[in-house]
Amino acid sequence: MFAALRVSDQHLKVMNPGVLGEATRRLIRREACLAWKARMEHNNQLLLSEHEEIQELVRSLAQAEGELRLLNRQAISCNIDPRKLRNRESWNDITRFTGPRARRLREFIDMGSEIGLMELRPVWLMGPDVVSRMLPLKKALFDRVVYDEASQMPIEFAVPSLFKGNVVVVSGDEKQLPPMSFFSSHAALDEDDSTDFDGEADDLTDDERALATEI
């Protein structure tokens, strides 16, 4: 920093004393920014790349990602055991989502797990509440159950999905704050206040029931 001031020594000597202080501050700020820029470029040589070089890296990364997706698809398909899959008629019975014989999504997953659905789709990504609502309560439905950001998950939410895996992997930061119920408790209180009325619903008149619903 002082070396930069020495370079500008002659210029600063002839400067008006009224603006000398502001000029010195600007010079120090400029030299500090240049030093920070040089340190960043030294630590990360990619910052010195030209625009075309960066674009070429982006294109090569996109190509590598496409190849990785293809390899993953091939790996999954090669690991499917045809002996665990039922015939086409069995699938036709559960894959009706319209009409009088339509299946609900929970029914589809429950019945599909018996005829090879987990073999065709071995990886499922979902939250604990969706697991409880959509997946059947069957022991060891999955080989592994992985909890990411486990420090943010209440234990009672994790119990149903614990039952569904042979092996459980828990990933989280023990230094993070635990999940808070402050906002949910206040929302529950507001909901209780909004639906507080005397008498059972069956005792209300149509007008009173409509008014309670609006509130």
Image (spheres, rainbow, N blue to C red):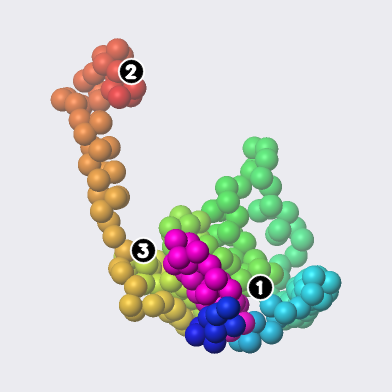
- Tell me, yes or no, if residue 24 can be seen here: yes
Q: Is 35 or 115 nearer to us in this picture?
A: 35
Q: Is residue 99 above or below residue 15?
A: above
59 sits left or right of 108 in the view:
right
Q: Earlier in the sequence, mark 1 or mark 3?
A: 1
Q: Main secondary structure of the magenta part?
A: helix
The structure residue drawn at horizontal position 29% and vertical position 43%, both measured from the top left corner, is: 187
The verdict on residue 21 being magenta is: yes
Label 2, secondary structure: give it.
Answer: helix
Foreground pick, 5 / 131: 5
Q: Residue at x 54, y 53 (%)?
A: 106
Q: Which mark is residue 157?
A: 3
Q: Residues within 10 Å of mark 3 (few under 14, many from 20)?
A: some
Q: Which residue is mark 1?
A: 119
Residue 93: % across, % down: 69, 53
Q: Identify the residue position indicated by label 2 in the image.
A: 210
Question: Is 175 on the left-hand or right-hand side of 162?
Answer: left
Instruction: Determine contact: label 1, label 3, CB under 8 Å.
Output: no
Q: Earlier in the sequence, mark 3 or mark 2?
A: 3
Q: Is residue 81 in view? A: no
Which numbered marker is on residue 12? none
Q: Position of residue 147 (x, y in %)?
A: 45, 73
Extreme-front residue of the structure: 14
Q: Residues within 10 Å of mark 2 (few under 14, many from 20)?
A: few
What span is in magenta?
11-39
* Circle 1 Cα neighbour tier, 10 Å, few/some/many (<14 / 14–19 / ≥20): some
Question: Vertically, is 120 above or below 9?
Answer: above
| Element type where label 3 sits in the image | helix
Q: Amino acid at mark 2?
A: Ala
Residue 99 spot, x, y in % from top left: 67, 38
